[in-house]
Image (cartoon, grey):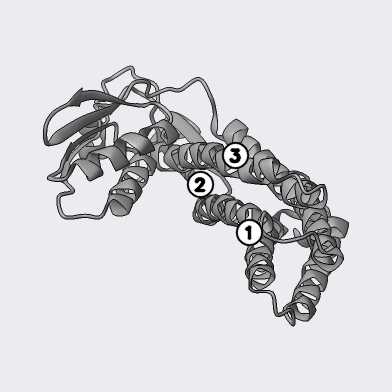
Amino acid sequence: MKRKLVKQGIRALTLTLPSDWIKRNHLNPGDEIDLIEQENTLTISTEKQQPLKEITVDVSGLLPRLADRFMARAYQKGYDKIILKFDNPDLMIAVKNKIPELMGYEILKTGKDFLEIQILSTQLDINFETMLRRALLLLMDMAKTCSDAWQKKDKKSLENIFYQDFDVNRFTYFCLRSLNKSSKLMSFGSSILYYLIESLEDLGDELKVLGNLLTNIKPKKEILNILNKMNEMFRLSYEFFYKPKKEQAVKAFKLYKEIGSLIEKALKTNNVDETKALISIDFSTRIIYHLTTMRLDTLKELSGE
């Protein structure tokens, strides 16, 4: 929509806010709003307490895995209250098992064929940046465990990667929900960040798979070398993500290409589990490299200033 600016005083210009937006956000004269200035864009938002965002869904006929995914998506999209109807107790079990991964969600009512789920705190005492960094650090630890524990034949640590992925899901789900709920976070480039966080959740799943595969394989020098290079690339990409430097981007890219070549050579193996592990490493490496490519625009050397 377009609005005309109205002159007020010597230098000030005013504009009217859409009445529908005012009603939807329950604003009154004297209320404060937030303004975010970014180049030629001005974002107007409010942190005023909003009514609960509710949804009632009948998941009857779905597979338990799909009910699980529905809960994750409903949480990420910002729903505060969900009434879930079902015709199969397996669906109820799947949803109940998913709730611990969704920060703030609690089951308030349970019936024979329904569940009532609600967020207990709309303002959790944590923030987006903290959760994103925790997810990245945990993923780095998972990747490092794949190489270190495998080299030491520490099967227990490899199996425990499964439980670390649980926390990765919690952190990334929270970040995706925060992006959808907060207009402050939804700035230019937020769609790329959203995709990256989705990819990080996939990385957690893949490292979980990799850890499980390695428990059935004897440590092999060639694959250990690839894992160590992947971890080095992960460290460089993480550092670049928060403090972009051209040298780090170049090193990460060279490692990425080197890892690809090494995987291609190692895939000549006749061991099926080794082949699966190499494919898993290749997929993980591709996601890790996103940390670098998605931040190239922040390099001062490319800003043209």
Secondary structure under the numbered disc 1 in the rendered image:
helix
Residue most extreme to the top: 30
- Please tell me whether mark 1 or mark 3 is closer to you in this view: 1
At x 28% / y 48%, what residue is drawn? 67
Secondary structure under the numbered disc 2 in the rendered image:
loop
At x 67% / y 54%, what residue is drawn? 215
At x 26% / y 21%, what residue is drawn? 28
User: Which residue is denoted by mark 1 in the rendering?
Assistant: 213
In-image side of 236 versus 101 (left or right):
right
User: Which residue is denoted by mark 2 in the rendering?
Assistant: 187
Within the image, what quadrant is residue 106 found in? top left
User: Which residue is denoted by mark 3 in the rendering?
Assistant: 164
In terms of sequence position, does the residue under pointer 2 or pointer 3 come before the other? 3
* Residue 109 percent across, percent down from the top left: 19, 23
Amino acid marked by disc 2: Ser
**Image quarter hosting the C terminus:** bottom right
At x 55% / y 36%, what residue is drawn? 167
In the image shown, does 285 or 264 lie closer to the viewer? 264
